[in-house]
Image (cartoon, rainbow, N blue to C red):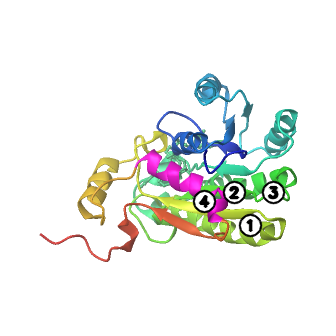
Amino acid sequence: MGFLDGKRALIVGLASNRSIAWGVAQAMKNQGAELAFTYQNEKLQSRVEKMAAELGSEVTIPCDVASDKDIEKVFERLDDYWNYVDIIIHSVAFAPREALEGDYLDAVTREAFNTAHEISSYSFAALAKEGRNMMEGRNGAMLTMSYLGAVRAMPNYNVMGLAKASLEANVRYMASSLGPDGIRVNGISAGPIKTLAAAGISDFRSMLSHVEKNAPMRRNITIEDVGNTSAFLCSDLAMGITGDIIYVDSGYHTIGMPALD
Ligand code: NAD
Ligand code: 0WE
């Protein structure tokens, strides 16, 4: 018996076995959910199909979230397998690499701003617009992934911080829009994790060791940590929670000063 028995979840943002989306998929499967996945492009197709199969799913659908047509087709395809969906996981972000290093004002451009906001924030609303029909009237839940850079200025995170601020506002407005349909919308603000999205980010290792030294729990978080909180937030155990951002970060955001020697 799991607390997601009978629930069906669509997971957007799986790229590798280090992806946060993989931690979410595993935790949801462990609690009894049935899963479907999208993949960004053909390069990722076979890897996503293999990982989906590991969790007993044969539903994998292409989707570049920059395309309204792709997003529309996701739910047409999903409808061939399922007549409803309970849960949508959005675990997607992108900004041009050059925008994610150095001084914020030096690095930000109109184009990087637009791309970051479109792919990392608008896409969550776009999925809701197309998916809400299949979610209606069954205690649905949507969940996205944010980062502390949404609410604090962090080195190098730059325009992604603005996009995450927009994403967190999107959570609140989507919650207000979908609440009357019984659909909850939340975000998890995760601490840093070494995934593909973190590969090649300068000083990522020092950020991990900073968290390990200074967060209340004195450790970094894992995709399992994020997965377990995701499973809870999308389950009926969290029926009273919507429009909110839950921190899964070893408590890092609660401290006011690094630990003194
Ligand atoms: P990841 O690289 O495994 O996942 C990012 C996903 O975004 C990939 O699956 C990629 O295919 C997808 N994506 C990017 N552009 C896309 C597009 N145009 N269309 C469709 N998909 C697209 O990395 P991750 O760390 O698991 O990132 C998942 C989410 O978690 C992101 O929103 C990220 O901002 C957030 N997050 C990550 C961390 C971290 O430290 N890794 C911390 C907090 C929040
Ligand atoms: O949200 C993120 C990363 C999202 C991301 C990553 C990349 C790398 C490859 C968005 N766009 C791109 N574009 C690419 O070309 N995180 C929370 C992880 C992350 O990224 C950072 C961080 C942290 C934490 C970048 C700078 C500083 C801190």
Q: How far apart are the two marked residues, 4 and 3, measured between alpha carbons?
A: 15 Å
Q: Amino acid at mark 4?
A: Leu
CB contact under 8 Å: marks 4 and 2? no
162 or 83: nearer the eye? 83
Q: Is residue 53 left or right of residue 147?
A: right
Q: Which residues are magenta?
A: 222-238
Q: Amino acid at mark 2?
A: Met
User: Which-is-in-front pick, marks 1 and 3?
Assistant: 3
Judged from the image, the secondary structure of the residue bearing numbered disc 2 is: strand
Q: Is mark 2 within 8 Å of ligand 1?
A: no
Q: How far apart are the two marked residues, 1 and 3, measured between alpha carbons?
A: 17 Å
Q: How far apart are the two marked residues, 2 and 3, measured between alpha carbons?
A: 12 Å
**What residue sits right under mark 3 in the picture?**
138
Q: Residues within 10 Å of mark 3 (few under 14, many from 20)?
A: some
Residue 224 among those drawn in magenta: yes
Mark 4 or 1 closer to N-term?
Answer: 1
Instruction: Residue lying at the far front in this picture: please name it.
Output: 1
User: Which-is-in-front pick, marks 1 and 2?
Assistant: 2
Judged from the image, the secondary structure of the residue bearing numbered disc 3 is: loop
- Label placed on residue 142: 2
**What residue sits right under mark 4 in the picture?**
233
Secondary structure, magenta segment, majority class: helix
Q: Amino acid at mark 3?
A: Arg
Q: Quadrant of residue 48?
A: top right
**What residue sits right under mark 1 in the picture?**
174
Quarter of the figure with the C terminus:
bottom left
Mark 1 or 3 closer to N-term?
Answer: 3
Q: Quadrant of residue 102?
A: bottom left
Judged from the image, the secondary structure of the residue bearing numbered disc 4 is: helix
For the point 49% across and 33% down, the residue is: 17
